Image: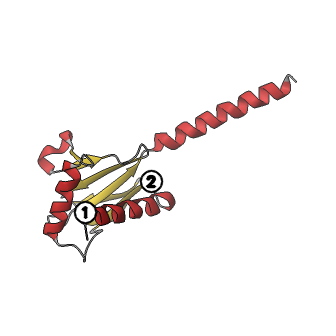
Amino acid sequence: MSYEEKLDFVLKRLYEKSAFYMPEIILCDYLSPNVSQNEFQEFKHKLISDGYLQQDPDQNSLGAYQASFSTKYKYSITSKGRHLVESGEGYVARKSQEKLILKITKNSYTINTWVLILSIISILLAIIALFR
């Protein structure tokens, strides 16, 4: 798999899952078994060099990275976590040294902002209709 194919694969999976799933999703071992750990490391470093990923300054010692591919989603790749546990917010990862995971968190403010804007427009249209 070329870098572009891997990136395309990942972004398609993110798009498919995020539209229909819960606010927080973790795709664990998303390229295996087709990609070795070394290939995954190379892919991760290429994402970093291309500016898709940046090391999270708050979690420097944990080796956590975060990136934004759009305004709606925040993605972080961390070397911690293979065991998933369900929480009220969605899924979170527990520590493990085996594999890297891709964690996607959907920013709720994006949806709430549109709901607020549409509500204000609806109220304004109702007021205009009253005075006609």
Q: Determine the secondary structure under disc 2.
A: loop
Task: Identify residue for label 2.
Answer: 23
Q: Does residue 95 appear in the picture of this structure? A: no
* Residue 117 percent coordinates (x, y): 60, 34
Residue 80 versus residue 55 in the image, above or below: below
x then y, percent, for residue 5: 31, 66
Residue at coordinates 68% horizontally, 32% vertically from top-left?
121
Classify 10 Å Cα crowding around label 2: few (below 14), some (14-19), many (20 and above): some
Q: Is residue 5 above or below residue 114?
A: below
Query: Which residue does the image show at 59% across and 35% down from the upper left?
Result: 116
Q: Earlier in the sequence, mark 1 or mark 2?
A: 1
Q: Amino acid at mark 2?
A: Pro
Query: Which label was assigned to residue 3?
Result: 1
Report whether 121 appears left or right of 72.
Answer: right
Q: Quadrant of residue 130?
A: top right
Query: Please, is residue 125 above or below residue 71 in the view?
Result: above
